[in-house]
Image (tube, helix red, strand yellow):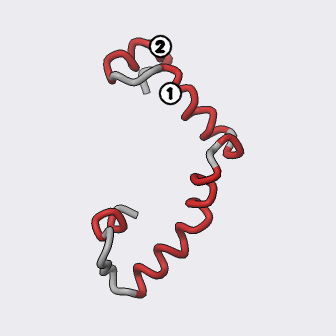
Amino acid sequence: MHRDRLGVEPICKVLQVAPSAYRRRVARRRDPDLRSPRALRDERVIGEIQRVWQANLRVSVDGGRKLSSL
């Protein structure tokens, strides 16, 4: 939101994020092929995970808190 007015570097400094990490994230958002194989696979299976979780009445034995954020 403030990138155009302030620039990336000062904002990253305040947020304690490396400017290269910001640029890498933007590049991956622009071109999904730059994402890791794991991220690409996760994107493909997220719908199936949500379907199974819903079918199980949103209850999970392992990782319940992680799944509730989907």
Q: CA distance from mark 2 to mark 1?
A: 12 Å
In the rendered view, does 7 fall on the left or right side of 64? right
Which residue occupies the foreground of this view, 69 or 7? 69
Number of marks drawn: 2
Residue displayed at 63% across by 55% down? 40
Tell me the tag on residue 70: none
Q: Is residue 41 left or right of residue 2?
A: right
Category of crowding for the residue at label 2, using alpha-carbon neighbours closer than 10 angstroms: few (below 14), some (14–19), many (at least 20): few
Location of mark 1 (residue): 22
55 up-or-down from 35: above or below: below
Quadrant for the N terminus, please.
Answer: top left
Q: Hey, what amino acid is under mark 1?
A: Tyr
Image quarter (top left, top right, bottom left or bottom right) of the C terminus:
bottom left
- The image quarter containing residue 67 is bottom left
Does label 2 or label 1 sit earlier along the sequence? Answer: 2
Q: Mark 1: few, some, or many residues within 10 Å (few <14, many ≥20)?
A: few
- The residue at 65%/38% (across/down) is 30
Residue 24: x percent and y percent?
57, 30
Pointer 2: what residue? 7
Tag 2 secondary structure = loop
Using the image as rendered, state which of residue 26 and residue 52 is in the foreground: 52
Quarter of the image where one finds residue 16: top left
Q: Position of residue 12 (x, y in %)?
A: 40, 20
Residue 36 location (% of width, % of height): 62, 46
Res. 56 image quadrant: bottom left
Image height of 19 relative to 42, above or below: above
**Which structural element holds mark 1?**
helix
Type of residue at label 2?
A: Gly
Relative vertical location of residue 70 with respect to residue 55 in this rendering, above or below:
above
Left or right for 54, reference 35: left
